[in-house]
Image (cartoon, rainbow, N blue to C red):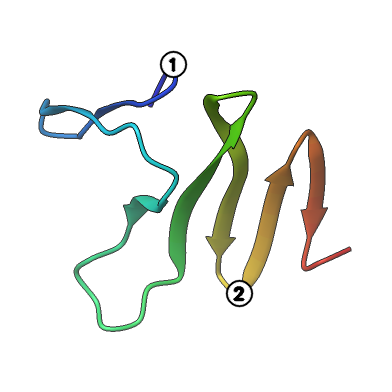
Amino acid sequence: TWGNFHFKTFDGQLFQVPDTCNYVLSVMCDSTVSDFNIQMQREIVNDTITFNTVTVKLEGAIIKITNGIITMDDQ
């Protein structure tokens, strides 16, 4: 993903989605319980959609980057 709302998938498809939804960028989809997940949340600041939070879930640990602050398991 880049810019305000551009996404390119692993198979080369290009999407432009100007919204503030929660997006799952990557997840293990070949098992019923995934231990790997990357999500992104955007928000509107000064009439511009910007990145708010990136969440990485890896083997039970949750790493979040929110407005430049990095936390792991809420610490």
The numbered disc on residue 51 is none
Q: Secondary structure at mark 1?
A: loop
Residue 43 placed where, x, y %?
57, 40
Q: Is residue 16 left or right of residue 73?
A: left
CB atoms at circles 2 and 1 under 8 Å apart?
no
Residue tagged 1: 3
- The residue drawn where x is 49% and y is 46% is 40
Residue 13 location, quadrant: top left
Residue 11 location, quadrant: top left
Q: Is residue 64 left or right of residue 70?
A: left
Say which of marks 2 and 1 sits in front: 1
Q: Is residue 45 left or right of residue 36?
A: right
- The residue drawn where x is 55% and y is 24% is 47
Q: Is residue 72 above or below residue 66?
A: below
Quadrant housing the C terminus: bottom right
Residue tagged 2: 60
Reading the chain from its start, which is encountered first: label 2 or label 1?
1
Quadrant housing the N terminus: top left
Q: Which is more toward the observer, 38 or 47?
A: 47
Q: Is residue 14 left or right of residue 64?
A: left
The residue lying furthest to the top in this view is 3
- Given the image, on which type of amino acid does mark 1 rest? Gly
